[in-house]
Amino acid sequence: MRRFLSLGLLCLLLLSVTVTAQAQTSATVDADDAAALELLEALDVRSYPAKGEAIIAILQSDDERARDWLQSLLDGRLQRADDGRFVVVLDNQGRDWPVADALTGEPLGEMSRRDLDRIGINNNLRNQLRSAIAVVDLYSPDVERRRTSATRLLGEVDEELAEPLGELIAAEDDTQVKRRLTQALAIYQVENGELEGVETLKGSLHPRVRVALSRAANDDDPIIADAANEALVSIEQNIKINRGLETLYFGLSLGSVLVLAAIGLAITFGVMGVINMAHGELIMLGAYTTWMMQQLLPGQPGLALILSIPAGFMVAALAGVAIERGVIQFLKGRPLETLLATFGISLILQQLVRTLISPLNRTVITPEWMSGSLVINDALSLTLNRMFVLGFALVVFAALMLIMRRTRLGLEVRAVTQNRAMARSMGIRATRVDIMTFALGSGVAGLAGVALSQLTNVGPNLGQNYIIDSFMVVVFGGVGNLWGTLVAGLSLGIINQVLEPWAGAVLAKIIVLVFIILFIQKRPRGLFPQKGRAAEG
Amino acid sequence: MTTLQRKTHPRTVARFATALITAAVMGASAQAVAQDDDPIKVGILHSLSGTMAISETVLKDTVEMLIEQQNDAGGLLGRQLEAVVVDPASNWPLFAERARELLAQEEVDVIFGNWTSVSRKAVLPVVEELNGLLFYPVQYEGEESSENVFYTGAAPNQQAIPAVEYLINQVGIERFALVGTDYVYPRTTNRILEAFLKDEHGIADEDIMINYTPFGHSDWQNIVAEIRRFGEEGKPTAVISTVNGDANVPFYTELSNQGIDAADIPVIAFSVGEQELTGIDTGPLVGHLAAWNYFMSVDTDENYDFIDAWIDYTGDEMAVTNDPMEAHYIGFNMWAEAVRKAGTTDVDAVKDAIIGVAVPNLSGGYAAMMPNHHITKPVLIGEIQDNGQFDIVWQTPSTVAGDAWSDYLPGSRDLIADWRKPMECGNFNVVNGSCGGSTAAEEAEAALAE
């Protein structure tokens, strides 16, 4: 996998790094700029191999700005204006962009994108740039940079780098960097048929290690081949376990999405018995609230997301009240009409969003702390956004359980659903309870929307994709039972993810649906049927 | 018809024919009068509601803008143009009804419309029956050529095949994951690509992974993990994505969250353009690829003028342009040029006049209408940038002519389409030298279904 850096380049690189440190102070500014301009001009050519050579030249120069140039080249921000000046684009949204001079760093105001030509790079150059920056960063005082750099070098060590690497490992005091560099060196050793490397790599789950070992397993030397094979067997075992855990996490994550989408419905449909086809659009409203909040608080996506939780709840709850007061209350006890009327409402809401906001998807930014994944080991990492959604679903569920079991509202809701006439004669205002319950269910749908805005499109069709799944979960779990919704959602998620690798996404979905149909045939009241008087509904 | 004639008295037939001729003459004279002052009607058949509204609404706006520009420049043949907009609401059967409405009731002179292949297939018989003109602006799977349809989007040889050759020759990819939405366009394209990879480049079975997902698929965890493992086995790997519409946002989000970097496993998409990227934070996607015939970042004055006009028309400073919009731009100008050449908007005259018409495209070259009703286009490969734009990293040295019938599928490779006289055939079989009619198309479809 030594794809990107030639031996010579690396050698020169290491030299230049040491030279740079000494030369920085002595160079005069004027001579520097002329030379620097020449270096940058070499980048402004059409051919990518020529640009590659220009990058090497920049690395070999003793210019202290080299790393910054390479980084802005990597980010696509290094551009050339019509007057020949090299600039760094600070923000590339819209028609006019603020820029700064690449040589002096001094801001130059805004320039039109018509007048700017980007120094383009492709994926091969991107790889070359990253490897180059990694080698420079190996000597960086910043631990984070050294960590990234060390991971990058796995499988990319060659003869020239192997030698200083030994010294670097000895001098390194960060254990993570040390371990990575040792592995990187070991891969190089394995590739050169040294048994010592195989020993070091035992138990490592990194894919580059596996590739190196699989190659070594076919080595001519039987001792190396056997050792590599042995190491591979235990690694494969370990990977299988990790893969199982990964599937479980995928299942729980999909399940939590299903639970979130369905739990509001479990209240409006399950507890109140209203078939609300506009449930999906209430979810959509929650997601749009998140987008709206991010528009109101530009630059603070995290804060906006947190504020969206109460806001999304309120917006969806108010919409729910409007639907209940405007339509559903007149259709009490007529499920078919309710179904049709709410279906109509769902279409109206969708088109309203299309007309008022846009038929296009809206960008909801994921805050920094929710992007990427939590690395457990080299074979298992859990995506952070989904982990937050999983946690959020459980919190929402717990809060709902508390409301239904421990508050006066919950008590009244249960009383009204069990026996409306009796509850009313006991002095409970059934109409008010209806409104509150519907608002609660709708509000929870809004919360689901806030969470889903982090996983999927925020567009007019968002709700449509979840309405069928929501009904499926509620019916499967047992109408009127919140625990049923939780268990049904999570187990359907896991079943789906276990089936998907060998059946494919389309077939897995069909199998799950068939399974639910058969299950409902056998147990019409779902997983957790309501017992006693509450069962009459 | 034959049984009817046998039963009817000859004199009745004669009288009926006379009446018909009279009507036709009167109609023609009425039309001649109409040509002087009535506007030319341009039908727009794009979904403004439902799932496809996300992509099709901007195309409606594009045609309206082009009409406005044409009118400002004095119209066409001295007449003004008038847009007739209908909404087929992302509903395939409704597309056929709306097309019939446009042609039979509104009597439009030309239709610009459709996005999905299935909607085009629904409209096709109507346009052929009523002898209309349809300009279809979206890249599609090929295997079709109709006398009444002009395909201004890319055929597979103008997008998919050059893209794969770029991956193999320029990037050095040896393993391919073909990921697509489960419907006709991805399935046909992937079938062509699979045959192409195996036959032309000797890629082994185990180095090709094919995966289909339902429309609007939102849970990509497993598939992305599978792609990651597929790419970790030591050979340079790429993903060829024919994932359509809404499913792309969760797909790309999952890719970036699971840390699949474009430099390790690049994803090249055939259905993701600037429009689709407006819903995504593209920071983590830098370097992933798309193959189109136009990008908004194309550095030509024609393109900047088009973008400025579009921004002024929409009033949105951040409005983006994309490939199907350019296809409408080309299609509209070709049609206008053909009308000028023919001196009339009569469908048959325009149909004959348009073949060979060449108009400027937005990437600094010319697009010409070929006899098979497809056009010539350059193929561009772009890498996604952090501002939702594409940086063009490669392009074909010259334009490529669209091929209606793929050379890589059995049953289809012997067919050509040529709508010039005297051939006038959409599926001429060069082996047995006959116009195959429907049988050849069916054979090709049967070969696909295998």
Image (cartoon, rainbow, N blue to C red):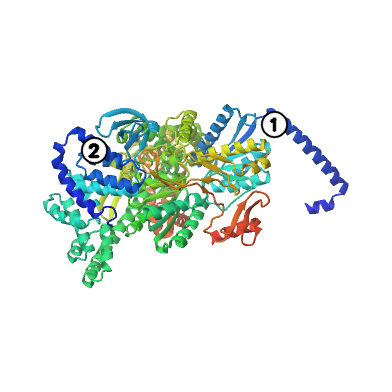
Q: Which residue is mark 2?
A: A35
Q: Which mark is residue B365?
A: none
CA separation in Å, label 1 and label 2: 69 Å
Residue B229 image point, x, y percent: 34, 57
The residue depicted at 75 percent of the width and 32 percent of the height is B30
What amino acid does circle 1 point to?
Answer: Gln
- B272 and B48: which is toward the camera: B272
Q: Which mark is residue B35?
A: 1
The quadrant holding residue B112 is top right
The residue depicted at 12 percent of the width and 49 percent of the height is A173
Circle 2 residues within 10 Å: few <14, some 14–19, many ≥20: some
Residue A455 image point, x, y percent: 37, 44
Quarter of the picture containing the C terminus of chain B is bottom right
Apparent side of residue B87 relative to residue A130 in the rendered image (left or right): right
For mark 2, name the chain. Answer: A
Residue furthest to the bottom: A222
Residue A375 image point, x, y percent: 26, 50
Circle 1 residues within 10 Å: few <14, some 14–19, many ≥20: some
Q: Is residue A317 visible?
A: yes
- A406 and B439: which is toward the camera: B439
